[in-house]
Image (cartoon, rainbow, N blue to C red):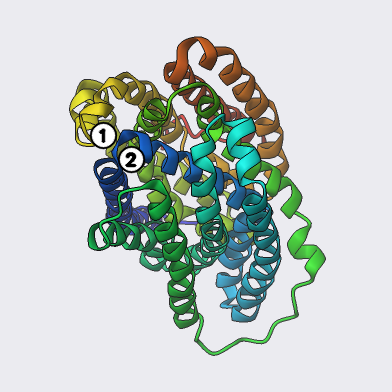
Amino acid sequence: MKTPTGNVNAGRGLALDTLFALGVRVLGAGASLLMSLVLARSLGAAEAGYFLLAFTVITFLAGLSRLGLDSIVLRFTGAAMVDKDIRTIRQVLARSLLLAGCVSAVVAGLLTIFAYPLAEWVFGKPALAPVLEKMAPGLVGLALFTLVAMSLQGLRKIASSVFTLNIFASLLLVSGLFVLVLSTAQQAAIAYSCSAIATLFFGLALWWRGTSAQEIKHDSLSWKTMLEPAIPLWIVLVMGQLIQWSSQFIAGAYVEPEQIAQLAVAQRTALLTSFVLMAVNLVVAPRFAAMHKQGDMAGVQRIAITSTRLMLLAAAPLVAIMLIFPAKLMLLFGEDFVAGAHLLQILAIGQLINVATGSVGYLLMMTGHEKDMRNSLLLVAPCSVLLSFLLIPSYGATGAAFATALAIASQNLFAVYWVHKRLGFNTLAIWRR
C-alpha cells in the first residue's frame, strides 16, 4: 500500500514526465502547424485543398492498413517493459511491421490503380487523382512509422516517439517546399511520400538503438495471444478515423477545394488543443498497461485523475485563444482562410471535451476493455457519418465542423461511462483526491 509520501512522489514523477512530454509535443505541434502554414502559403487555398484532402485519404487508409496493431504494439511493449522483456518487444514490432507492411502495400497499389475513379466518382474532383497517385507510397511509410513510434512510446522513449510520429516527416516536407520551391499539390505529394519513407528508416534507427540492451530470455509470445485483441482494436481505430476525418471526405464531394482547405486547416489548428492529451498519453498509456499487469488499479486511477487535471490546466488557455481570436489565427494561413474562423471555434469546443474527459480511450484499451471502446465507436461513427450527410449539403463546411465536434465529444463521453463501469472511477471527477 502506498504511503501519502509515495503518492506525492508518484504524482511529482508523473508531472515531471508529463512536462517533458508536453515540451516534446509542443515541438510536434509546432512542426504540424508549420507544415500547414507553409502548404497554405506555398500552394494557395485551392492546391492546398487538394493536398490536404489526399492526405486525409491516405491517413485513413494507413489506419485501416495497421489492423489495430498500433494499440497492440503499445500495450504489449508497455507490459513487457515491467520485466525488461526485450525479446517480446522485438517480436511484437517485427510481426506488426510484417503484417501492416503487406496490407499497406496492397492498399497503396489499389489506391494507385483506382485513383481516377475515386477522384471523379466519389469526390467529383478529377484533379485530385494525380495527387492521390503520387501520395500512395507515403501511405506505406505512414502506416509503418506509426507502429515504430508506438513501440518507442511503449519503451518510454518519449522524444524519439514524437520525433518519429509528428516531427520528422513534417520538417522534411517543409524543407522540400522551401528548397525545391514546390508550387503544386502533385509536387508536394511526391515530397510527402519521400518524407514518409525516410521517416520510417529514421524511426527504426532510433528504435534499434533503444532496444540494444542485453536480451532477457522469456517464453516466445504466441501469435494468438498477440492478435486476439487486434480485431476489436482495429475496429476502434477505423471508427475513430471515421469520426475524425469522415466529414472531410463527405465535404470533399460537396464543397469547393478552398472550403476543404479552410476546414482542414481549422481542424488541424483545433487539434493543437488535443496535443496536451497526446503528450499525457505518451506518458500514461505504457503505465496503464504496466500497472494493469501488476494488478495496481489504485495506481491506474490515481494517474488517470492526476493527468486529467494537468491536461485541463494546460489546454484551457489554448481553447480560450481559439474561441476569442479565431480570425487572427486563421489569417496566419492567408487571407483566403479567414472565412473559416467559425469552423475553428466549433472544432475547438469538441477538442476541449476530448481533453476534459482524460485518457479514457487508452484506459480502456490498455486494461483489456477494448471491446467496450469498440462498441461505443460502432454507435458514434455511423451517426457521425449520417449527420455529415445530413448537414454538409445544406451547410457546407460549417455542417462538417459541427458533425465532427459532436462526434468527438460523444465518443469520449461514452468512454467515460465505460471507464466508470469497468474500472470504478470517473475521470471527470477531477476534484476528488
| Left or right side of 221 for 174 | left
List the residue tagged with mark 2. Answer: 272
Above or below for 176 versus 244 = below
Q: Position of residue 182 (x, y in %)?
A: 30, 54
Above or below for 257 versus 238 = above
Q: Is residue 6 visible?
A: yes
Q: CA distance from mark 1 to mark 2?
A: 8 Å
**Image point 45% across, 29% down: which residue?**
429
| Left or right side of 99 for 131 | left
List the residue tagged with mark 1. Answer: 318
Q: Nearer the viewer, residue 156 or 272?
A: 272
Label 1–label 2 contact, CB within 8 A = yes
Amino acid type at mark 2: Leu
Q: Nearer the viewer, residue 154 or 93?
A: 93
Residue sitting farthest toward the top: 394
**Image point 79% across, 71% down: which residue?**
222
Tell me which label, 1 or 2, sits earlier in the chain.
2
Mark 1 or 2: in front is 2
Above or below for 154 versus 117 = below
Q: Position of residue 91 (x, y in %)?
A: 67, 76
